[in-house]
Amino acid sequence: MTKKITILLCFFVFTGSIFSQKTKKLDEILITGKVVDANSNQALEYATIVLKNTNTQKISGGITDKKGLFNIKTNKGNYEISVEFISFKSKKYPKQVINKNLNLGTIKLSEDTNSLDEVVVIAEKTTVDIRLDKKVFNIGKDLSIRGGNASDVLGNVPSVQVDVEGNVSLRGNENVTILIDGRPSALVGINGADALRQIPAEAIEKVEVITSPSARYDAEGTAGILNIILRKNKLTGFNGSLQFDAGYPERYGSAFNANWRTKKWNLFTNTGFRYRAAPGHAFSDTENFLSTAKNARVIEERRFGRLSRSLFTSFGVEYYITKNSSIIGNIILNRGNDDDVNTNSIDRFDSNGGLNEATFRTENEAEDEQRIQYTLDYINNFDGKGRKLSINTQYSTETEDILNDITEIETQSNLLNDLEQVIEDQDEKRFLLQADYVHPVGENIQYEAGYRGNYRDIFNNFNLAERQVFPNGPLVPDTGLNNSFNYKELVNAAYFQYGHQFDKISVLAGLRYEYTSVEIEQQTSNSASKNNYGNFFPTINLGYEFKDGENITLGYNKRIRRPRGRFLNPFPSRSSESNIFSGNVSLRPVITDALDLGYLKRWKKFTLSTSIYYNRSDESWEFIQENTGDLTDNGDPILRRFPINLSLEERVGFEFTLNFRPFKVWNINSDFNLFHTITDGDYIDPKTNITTNFDFENTAFFIRLNQKFTLPSKIDLQINSNYRGASQNAQSTNQGIFTMNIAASKDIFKEKASLSLNVSDVFNGRKRMSTIFLPGISNQYSEFQRRVGPQVRMSFVYRFNQKKKRIRQEREDDGGGEF
């Protein structure tokens, strides 16, 4: 299969090269230059250069790249030239005869204070911006996630999948690092899936997909990095937007984001509130093969009645010390409160199909969450020619308090036969200090070095009490499950990287060293353990530019997956009476070598990005499921699941992403990912000496098609389709999942406001259906839907002192370096 993928990529490269060969006309000339901010000398990306042929009245031109450079081919003739950018005074060149190549040099644009009451965009950005080192997903253009959250946003990003439980994967690999503004953050949370659902989509400006990270980034995450950039508007004057949402199942929300900028100060805020009911459903059918099992078959049907409220607010201040340096302070508060009522109807049968027992289990769960993040950043661009120093500090905390009262009634007799109470507290504290220095030498060489210290302190307290004597006996703590677990981690990292551009070849090579110190304390068992280890992580990214808009890249990097939290906690946690999970305090990190070969080609209406990737992980984790030998009060076997370093895993894949605009009113974004996984490993049970083989091969794929149409009356229509193919591993199979979202938007009030309608999961297909095979123990078929049925949202957005299609006049320091 690898050979076929290689041939396919070569076909793309060959045909793209042939297609791009054009005979140069004798009267063709080249107009070049650079556009910068007159105040800060910072390059202006997406500035527009307009060429008007005064003889034919034909309009042509182009836009600047991320370095502010433009390169426009046109024919000889008489032209008027103008350079334009949002909220800046245009630079005009009068009518002149151009009969040879023209270099306009560095063009400095000044802010236009008379245009601050209404900002109009000249150049419009595409929804997905494909670059050599990353894919950038711009949130503002996606109608389907209005009123949604960060999980909804990531679910539409190229190469990214979000499963029905909210777990995020990149190219089919769930070990992906999620950063906020280029840095680790408690906003991602101890439980990333739940935390991401608390961040409103309106607070996110863009998402960067980085599959071959440079040495500047943390080495954590064997699949790569997803960098979520929060909004920090910098438009001059006062401007912003106000949004209201309502939907079914019952949901309400509002969002406000704005900024006010003067010459020395910029204040910005993003605030959102959400109230949402989310009914869910699950079903399982389990066959037990153990001779000790009282019940040969158990059928469960769960109903989830979730009610959540969340508040997200961010407030920041930037002070411009000089035209090239500034200090930024930012505070983010995220609070959530959930009240859930979940029920579980359970029927237990004997080997002849007779009903042994029927019970009805109710869980009343209340959860309070709070996350606070404080950041203080200093940025100095020195002379504005590329030399840069940034110093970042960040402190964040997360707390989660859960109270769950559980009752179980025997349906036939209507008697209470079980009463439990679970109290769980989780806390996390993080502190980060980072310094990065970039030093260019001439136009083609760049050095960069930096340090990052990242400290995490995670505390988990789990208490389960159960009534042993009915009907009025006391709640008795379960000493076999209760425990307090404290995990402390300090990672000190330093890196150096060197970039050099040789004509059409660019090289970015770096080396990162990370030293990790881990301390684990189990307060209940009064035990502690420590572990220290250091690792070097080399990275190299090579690029060759055939011509403007056509490139091939090759990247190599070494990555790590560190065990933490529940994966290390040996005290069991319980998801149900018959299923427990326990960590492994001896679990070691997984080291992965990653190789990525990519090709990028841009045509006038079409952009294609393809890549072949290969990952090899030694001592990869496998999750062993075994019979503990114990039975529940209902006679079901109690199974334990735990991780160990077991297998060698190899993953090879092929993906392509394309942007295509066949007509002015129709824009297409699509991506396809095909990957093949090979796992090799055997587990020998030390108790029974039975060997379980974990060897398997699996080929899986997913495909996404997003289409946006401009209909009459200026109505925008967006249709997002997503199919995730079937997959399997050594112990389970998963069926394919198809989902479709449809959204429409209409501008009103002279484009100062928009009204949009969103229907997600139109065909109710977002359902996980899987089968788990445990030879000699059990087979289980299960279904899970976090949200049942289509969900409908209506959103109203009002913009003040800006129009619908706006872009930032300055590029953010998003924590990632580019060369």
Image: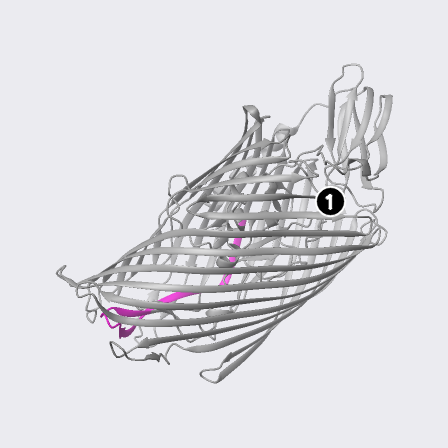
- Image quadrant assignment for residue 50: top right
Bounds of the magenta segment: 613-639
- 495 vs 145: above or below: below
**Which type of secondary structure does the marked residue at label 1 adopt?**
strand
Examine the residues drawn in magenta and state their main secondary structure. strand
Residue assigned mark 1 = 238
Is residue 721 part of the magenta span, yes or no? no
Q: Is residue 265 left or right of residue 432?
A: right
**Is residue 348 rendered to the left or right of residue 80?**
left
Name the foreground residue: 468 vs 390.
Answer: 468
Task: Name which residue lies at 59% across and 46% down.
Answer: 597
Left or right of 502 on screen, residue 94: right
Percent of width and height locating residue 768: 37, 50
Which one is nearer the viewer's eye here, 221 or 650?
A: 221
* Residue at position x 42%, y 42% in the image: 761
Q: In the image, residue 243 lies at what x, y percent?
A: 58, 43
Q: Is residue 112 visible?
A: no
Give the vertical position of 766 relative to 317 (above or below): above
The magenta stretch spans residue 624: yes
The amino acid beneath tag 1 is Phe
Q: Quadrant of the N terminus?
A: top left
Image height check: is 694 above or below 747? Answer: below
Residue 623 percent location from the top left of the image:
40, 65
Compared with 473, 400 (above or below) is above
- Crowding around mark 1 (Cα neighbors within 10 Å: few <14, some 14 to 19, many 20+) is some
Whole-percent x, y for residue 214 in the image: 66, 55
- The residue lying toward the viewer, choosing from 614 and 85, is 85
